[in-house]
Structures are given as C-alpha cells and as structure tokens.
Image: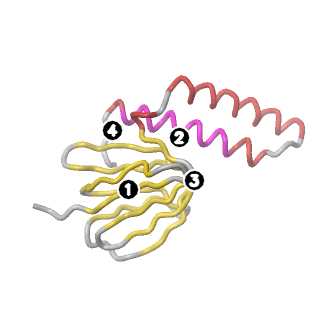
Amino acid sequence: MANKILLEVVTPDKLLLSKEVDVVVATGVDGEFGVLYGHVPFLSSLAIGELRFKDGNQTEFAAISGGFAEVTGKKVTVLAEAAELAREIDIDRAKRARERAEQRLAQAQQEAMDYARAEAALKRAMLRMRVVERGIGGGGMA
C-alpha cells in the first residue's frame, strides 16, 4: 500500500481539515502543484484557487482564498486566509456574492473605485461556485 501524506488546512478561525490522503493539488501563485508522499520540501504562496485532494477513489475539493502551503515529505500544511470545503459551501449564498461582486466591478469601472478589490471578490465568489459544482459532480484530479 502506498504511503499517505497528512493534509492540514488551517484558517485564522479554525482547523478546517486534518486528513491523510494520497495526493494534494493546490493553486500556487505560479500555477498548480501536486504533492505525493515523499515530496521534496518547499513553501509556496497560494492564489485564490481550488485545493483538491484524493483518498483512494474519492476526490474532494475546497476553495482557498490565498495564504501559504508548506510541504514536507510527510505533510502539507495550508495556512489559508479563508477556506471552505465544497460540501460546506452554500451555493445560493455564493451566487448572490457573485452577483454583488459583478455589480461592484461594473461600478468600479465607471466610478474609478477600487477595481482590484471588486475583481478579487468576483474571483472568490466564482471559485466557491466552481468548487461546489466539482464537488457535487465528482470531478477528478485532472
């Protein structure tokens, strides 16, 4: 049997997840990276993006809103600004957040408001919706 790697996802509020898994795939600022047991140690800044992890035949998803990932040969620690497991995301709330973010983005373009903040809010809302859809649909690791 293959060795498993411990995945821990921590936010300022709580320990979201602590689970032994076969593989972890995260979205770093320089692109996606995958981690298996025995991986060379490294540290990565995380972008607003998807975290997926596989245990046996089950793939699970989480929405990560920035932070850092520390990888050792036996453990991946994700220190996230915010994180939600797909199964815990309220899809209706995420849709409303997307709509508000789209309105703020349009307003920011017209009124020279803080475009970057509005764009980040839209990215977070769209990510949450995508993670829920993938979690429900059982999307794979690819």
Q: Quick check: 121 left or right of 27?
A: right
Local SS, label 1: strand
Residue at position x 34%, y 53% in the image = 18
Residue kind at label 3, given as amino acid type: Glu
Mark 1 is surrounded, within 10 Å at the Cα level, by few (under 14), some (14 to 19) or many (20 or more) other residues, namely some
- Do the numbered discs 2 and 4 sit on residues whose CB atoms are within 8 Å? no
- 15 is within the stretch colored magenta: no
The mark nearer the N terminus, 1 or 3, is 1
The mark nearer the N terminus, 2 or 3, is 3
- Per the rendered image, the range of residues in magenta is 120-135
The mark nearer the N terminus, 2 or 4, is 2
Local SS, label 4: loop
**Relative to 7, is 85 above or below?**
above
Pick whichever, 86 or 114, lies toward us.
86
Q: Which mark is residue 139?
A: 4
Instruction: Farthest residue to the top: give it.
Output: 92
Residue placed under numbered mark 1 in the picture: 25
Mark 1 or 3, which is nearer the eye? 3
Q: Residue 81 carries which label?
A: 3
How much space separates mark 2 and mark 4, taking CA atoms? 15 Å
Mark 2 or 3, which is nearer the eye? 3
Residue placed under numbered mark 2 in the picture: 127
How much space separates mark 1 and mark 3, taking CA atoms? 18 Å
Q: Position of residue 71 (x, y in %)?
A: 39, 69
Instruction: Farthest residue to the left: give it.
Output: 1
